[in-house]
Every structure is written in structure tokens, then in C-alpha cells.
């Protein structure tokens, strides 16, 4: 049933007991140390429960939309990145849940699960392959139509992490309601193929093997890797996250909840982009970064200072192609007065994100919602 409150997943950190009018005692995580119980703030108890909606695509997928109802002028669509799901923004650790953070500022937040991720469902049990184009031409048009229908709005704000930000540009070019995006925030979003991520040199030689697989099992690998989260935390730096901005509890929750497997067809399409320095649809009909100079909407690009997946230099190449009057580039890192440097995922899921990143994004979004 659409629009009904979602049930808790049972995670130690999750609570959907808002609005019951009774004090509850909930486990509270204190950044990688111990857990204890406190009575919840009565104000928090009045927050609305999360509601679940479905958007049906033309090829039969049911795309899940998780909604925190708010009273902003325009609803906010939050789009996760590659190999992730709605918990990219709706994280099990409340302090790092950007969707709830925005909702507390009054925003009407809709978090999508693209096909193959989270709660989205396909209409058949047969194995299905999909690619980037299916997100652009199937999932997101269906999701946006559903949001506009339910909210009675004419426009949306778009917030995308990594691939979720990239998707906004081809969507803007191809969606029938061309002026539907009111503003755009991209978070750690790679916009060129000039800088190839370090993993590419390891995976590229495996393309022949990947082609034989239905999918790359990132979800399974992540569940195994969580057993080794401590050495991973010690080793990792300057790629996915800054070591000083991550702790065990965040990393374990991320690996347990936020990683999804990816069909080989999508991985191979991305590898083809990197190999040939292009960014186009599978049939070659659409250059997805074409006509950037015609995108006349307010854009905020947020990037981490040490993110090798999304180097600042690459983003600056894209900025030159966008109308300058509507464009803001924000680099989060020590050189810009922040306590921490930031990598690819800790812009949203880092220890300091709620204090340094969330307020900046929310403040900018409020200005666009007038």
C-alpha cells in the first residue's frame, strides 16, 4: 500500500517510533565507544513517520520512494550513488541521516531506490541487466512524476551523491517537463572521465571475466569485509574517506546497510566511458554532458578536498561549461577552514558532516526554496 508508514528494519540505530506520544528509551551510539539509553527528547517524538511510495516504470519495475513529509515550497529528491541505496541519505545512524536533517528544517524529502537497490522490485524473477540509461529514461522520470503527483508541486530540488548527481544532467536534457528541477546539489559527483579512479587499473583487465557474471557482488563482498573493518579503517585514507573523519560504527553500518551489487552491464558501460573518455548513452545517441551551457538553474557542487574519485580539478573543468551566474563550487577540507579533510563518502557519512557539511547544504537549499 502506498503512503503507509515504513516499519523499522530492526537496526540498533534505527527508530521510527516518532509521534506515539509516549516516552521511549532508545540505544544511543557515541562515536565508536559504548552504548547507553536515554529518554528521547519529546520534540523528536513529534517527527512524522517515514512513508513509502512506489513509482512504476514503463518496463515494469516498482521504484521505491521513501518520504519524510515536510512543508517546503518544493519537494526534495535525494538520489543515491552507484552500488548504494536510499540509506546513502537515510542512514541508520540518526546523526548522519541527511534526509531527516533536512526534514527537521522543514523540507519535504523523497529518497529514491533506483532499480536493483533497496526496496525497489522488478516484475519478473528472470535475471535482468540494466545500465545507466535505464535510470535516466525509466526510473527517474517515474519517480519524479510520482513526487509531483503526490505533492501537487510543479518543481523539485535535486540532491545527488556521486552518480546520483551525474544523473541530474541527462535527466534535465531528456525529461519531458524540462523546467521541473528548481535547484541542484551534487555531492562528490564526478563530471568528467579525465581522472580515472585508482580501482580502474585493477578492474579494467577483468572486463572479460566481469562480462561472464550477472553482477559484481559488492553487497556480498561488503558483508564479508565488515569482518575486517578495523584494518580497513586503519588502511583507508584519501580515497573513499578521510581516516580522521570515520569511525568503526559508521563504517560497519555503511558496509552492512548501504552497499548494493551492480549488474555487469552497468559496470562495463562505465568502464567504456573511462576507456574512451566519453559519457554517452549505450546506443551513442545521447552525449550526457552535452549542452551544459544551457542548464540555467542554481547549482551547488560540493566536493571533498582529498576525494580521488571526484578531484576538484575535474570539477573545475565542468564549472567552466556551466553558466557562472548560477554556479557555486564548495570544497570541504582543512585548507578551506574545516576541521577535517573529506573524501568521497564522508561528505555525507563522516563524523564531522552534521556539523560542517549538512548546515552548508541546507542553508543553500533554503535560499533556493523561496
Image (tube, rainbow, N blue to C red):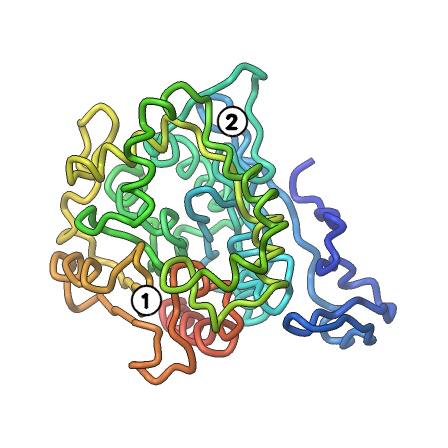
* Quadrant in the rendering for residue 364: bottom left
Disc 1: CA contacts within 10 A as few (<14), some (14-19) or many (>=20): many
Horizontally, is 126 left or right of 204 in the view?
right
Mark 1: secondary structure: loop
Front one among 71 and 91: 91
Tell me where residue 179 appears, x and y as whole percent.
Answer: 29, 49
Residue 306 bears which disc, if any?
1
The residue drawn where x is 44% and y is 60% is: 236
Q: Decide: is 103 above or below 198.
A: below
Q: Position of residue 346 (x, y in %)?
A: 46, 64
Up/down of 181 relative to 83, above or below: below
Q: In this rendering, would 322 be left or right of 69?
A: left
Residue 332 position within the rendered picture, expressed as x and y whole percent measured from the top left: 35, 73
Q: Look at 40% across and 27% down and name the residue there.
A: 264
In the rendered structure, are the residues bearing label 2 and label 1 in contact, judged by CB atoms less than 8 Å apart? no
Crowding around mark 2 (Cα neighbors within 10 Å: few <14, some 14 to 19, many 20+) is: many
Q: Please identify the quadrant where the C terminus is shown.
A: bottom left
The N terminus is located in which quarter?
top right
Count of picture labels: 2
Q: Residue at x 40, y 54 (%)?
A: 161
Looking at the image, residue 70 sits to the left or right of residue 173; the answer is: right
Outermost bottom residue: 337
Q: What is the secondary structure assignment of the residue under circle 2? A: loop
How far, Cα to Cα, is label 2 from label 1?
37 Å
* Placement of 50 over or under 283, stated as above or below: below
| Disc nearer the start of the sequence (2/1) | 2
Marks 2 and 1: which is nearer the front?
Answer: 1
Residue corresponding to mark 2: 61
For the point 70% across and 44% down, the residue is: 4
For residue 277, the mark is none
Amino acid at each position: 500500500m502506498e503512503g503507509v508508514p515504513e516499519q523499522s528494519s530492526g537496526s540498533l540505530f534505527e527508530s521510527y517510533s516518532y509521534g506515539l506520544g509516549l516516552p521511549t528509551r532508545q540505544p544511543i551510539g557515541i562515536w565508536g565507544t559504548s552504548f547507553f539509553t536515554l529518554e528521547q527528547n519529546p520534540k523528536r517524538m513529534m517527527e512524522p513517520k517515514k512513508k513509502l511510495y512506489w513509482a512504476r516504470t514503463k518496463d515494469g519495475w516498482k521504484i521505491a520512494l521513501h518520504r519524510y513529509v515536510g512543508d517546503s515550497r518544493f519537494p526534495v529528491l535525494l538520489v543515491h550513488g552507484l552500488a548504494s541505496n536510499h540509506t546513502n541519505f537515510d542512514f541508520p545512524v540518526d546523526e548522519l541521516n541527511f534526509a531527516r536533517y533536512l526534514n527537521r528544517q522543514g523540507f519535504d524529502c523523497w529518497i529514491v531506490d533506483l532499480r536493483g537497490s533497496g526496496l525497489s522490485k522488478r516484475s519478473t524473477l528472470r535475471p535482468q541487466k540494466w545500465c545507466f540509461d535505464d535510470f535516466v529514461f525509466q526510473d527517474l522520470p517515474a519517480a519524479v512524476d510520482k513526487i509531483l503527483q503526490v505533492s501537487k508541486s510543479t518543481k523539485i530540488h535535486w540532491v545527488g551523491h556521486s552518480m546520483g548527481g551525474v544523473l541530474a544532467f541527462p535527466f534535465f536534457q531528456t525529461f519531458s517537463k524540462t523546467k521541473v528541477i528548481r535547484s541542484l546539489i551534487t555531492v562528490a559527483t564526478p563530471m568528467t572521465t579525465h581522472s580515472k579512479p585508482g580501482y580502474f587499473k585493477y578492474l579494467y583487465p577483468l572486463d572479460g571475466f566481469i562480462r561472464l557474471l550477472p553482477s559484481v557482488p559488492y553487497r556480498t563482498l561488503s558483508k564479508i569485509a565488515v569482518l575486517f573493518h578495523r584494518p580497513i579503517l586503519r588502511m583507508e585514507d584519501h580515497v573513499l574517506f578521510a581516516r580522521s573523519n570515520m569511525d568503526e560504527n559508521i563504517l560497519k553500518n555503511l558496509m552492512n546497510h548501504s552497499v548494493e551489487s551492480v549488474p555487469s552491464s552497468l559496470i562495463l558501460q562505465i568502464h567504456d566511458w573511462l576507456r574512451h573518455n566519453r559519457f554517452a548513452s549505450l546506443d551513442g545517441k545521447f552525449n550526457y554532458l552535452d549542452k551544459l551551457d544551457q542548464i540555467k538553474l542554481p547549482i551547488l557542487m560540493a566536493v571533498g578536498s582529498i576525494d580521488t574519485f571526484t578531484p576538484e580539478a575535474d570539477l573545475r573543468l565542468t564549472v567552466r561549461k556551466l553558466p557562472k551566474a548560477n554556479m557555486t563550487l564548495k570544497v570541504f577540507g582543512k585548507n578551506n577552514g574545516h576541521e577535517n579533510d573529506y573524501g568521497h563518502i564522508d561528505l555525507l557519512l563522516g563524523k564531522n558532516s552534521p556539523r560542517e557539511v549538512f548546515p552548508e547544504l541546507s542553508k543553500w537549499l533554503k535560499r533556493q526554496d523561496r
